[in-house]
Amino acid sequence: MAVYADREAFIPYRKADVVELCIEDGKLSPADAKKFREFCEILGAYYHFDFHHDLEAMKQNFSAFDPDADTKPRIIPTPEQKQEMQGKLVEELSSVLEKANYRKLTEQELQNALEQESLITLRMHVDFNDYETWTLYHRGSGQQTVELKKMFGLKKVPLTMDIFERVVLLIKFKNRDYFLQKFKGNKKKVDALNFEPGKMYLYMYKNIPQADLEVLFPNVDISMNFKDLMMLWVPAAGAGIATLIKVLPNLIIILGVLSAVMFGKEATGLSDPKGIIAGLSGLAVLGGFVFKQYIAYKNKRIQFLKQVSDTLFFKNLVCNAGVFNALIDAAEDEECKEVFLAYYHLLTNPPLTKEQLDDTIEQWLETKFSTKIDFDVDKALQQMEKMRGKIVQEGVSEEDTPEKPLLVRDDKGVCHVLAIDDAKTMIDYIWDNIFQYNE
């Protein structure tokens, strides 16, 4: 069984497409192809119901931290209860993300991302001390080439970036007291924050450059980098010196007048109104230049902030409670696709071990569809072994019929699955017996 460090377990086809890919393989008769579709349909319905429980659990535990909640809590949870809900939510979310074949960002990956040169020419800093907890997962990696403008926009240079196709970020900010202490009791600064202390935020993004991960954090501190500061202030300093030399005589006149007024002395030689007007004009020119440079700095900062805003606006897929629905849908699809592929290949090939099944599926996808993945065979087999139901034969009571799993492994590790008719019957039995209210 091959292990690929450069591949992911994500299967880049829709659930319905996986079913058709298997049928188009040509190993199933028309009758069995119909039965296989029916098996996949009822199995998909079972998974849909099963994952609904996970969705409700996450929504329940998120309710105490939801910054967008439009309902009122019937009972306000205690701090101890909120802490317990937070722990459960992080655990449940991590489980669903792993089922959806997301991978957690490691400390080394984060450090590498923070050290890379960003596409957004900003100096960015994230204070991770602001968070009570945070976690970032990603799925799908690739490269994207963009054109950067150089030499004042006269030249375009291609830049190839490593990207994450999907990113999920969960953060929980520390409470208000922490931020009051951080800002030394300045309530205005705390009230002006673009997030609410003590709340939890959940985001899902697409096609994020790995070097721009800092942009995703809502408390990122943005400033110009050294190069941009030099581009702004070096020309300003040169022009400022020239302006100062030009208006210096007029400034001397103004300073003389001010000195005479302040110290009660006679402004000898400075009583000429033309000289005073000239001095004031020089002062106005200098003030206008300073104001012009300040506006240029503000405009440059606004351009940078627009870059960040565009990145977040056009790449944001969903946020907060809405993320749960997207993740549950992704996890449901991934587990269905894995079982579909595993069952099909065990059904249509000679008996296979786990290692042989893993290699068979990976080679099949690569040869037929030029798709390279690291198939999660362990997860697929565990799911199939966990599905147990009864296949009641005519003339035998249900009580006397033992439960059978969808898959068993013999002493040599060879995998055996139920025939397609029995598999459909077994899943149908599980579906019929989810609720036992009607005795």
Image: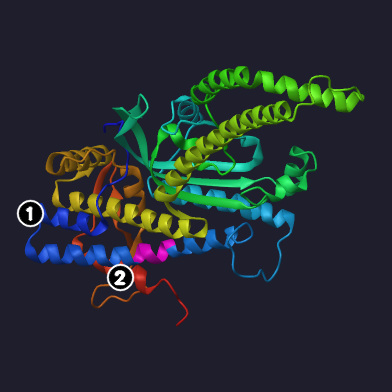
Q: Is there any visible trace of residue 52 in the rendered image?
A: yes
Structural crowding at the residue carrying mark 2, measured as other residues with C-alpha within 10 Å and reported as few (<14), some (14–19) or many (≥20): some
Residue found at the very far right of the displayed protein: 264
Q: How many marks?
A: 2
Is residue 164 placed above or below 436 in the rendered structure? above
Q: Residue at x 46, y 26 (%)?
A: 112
Instruction: Return the residue nearer the eye: 47 or 392.
Output: 47
Q: Residue at x 59, y 59 (%)?
A: 61
Residue type at tag 2: Asp
Query: The N terminus lies in which quarter of the figure?
Result: top left
Dot in front, 1 or 2? 1
Disc number for residue 428: 2
Instruction: Return the residue nearer the eye: 111 or 161.
Output: 161
Is residue 406 placed above or below 315 in the rendered structure? below
Q: Which residues are magenta?
A: 46-51
Q: How is the image coloured?
A: rainbow
Choose the circle earlier in sequence order: 1 or 2.
Answer: 1
Disc number for residue 26: 1
Instruction: Return the residue nearer the eye: 156 or 91.
Output: 156
Q: Seen in the image, is 15 located left or right of residue 172?
A: left
Q: CA distance from mark 1 to mark 2?
A: 26 Å
Q: Is residue 49 magenta?
A: yes
Q: Seen in the image, is 284 located left or right of residue 232?
A: right
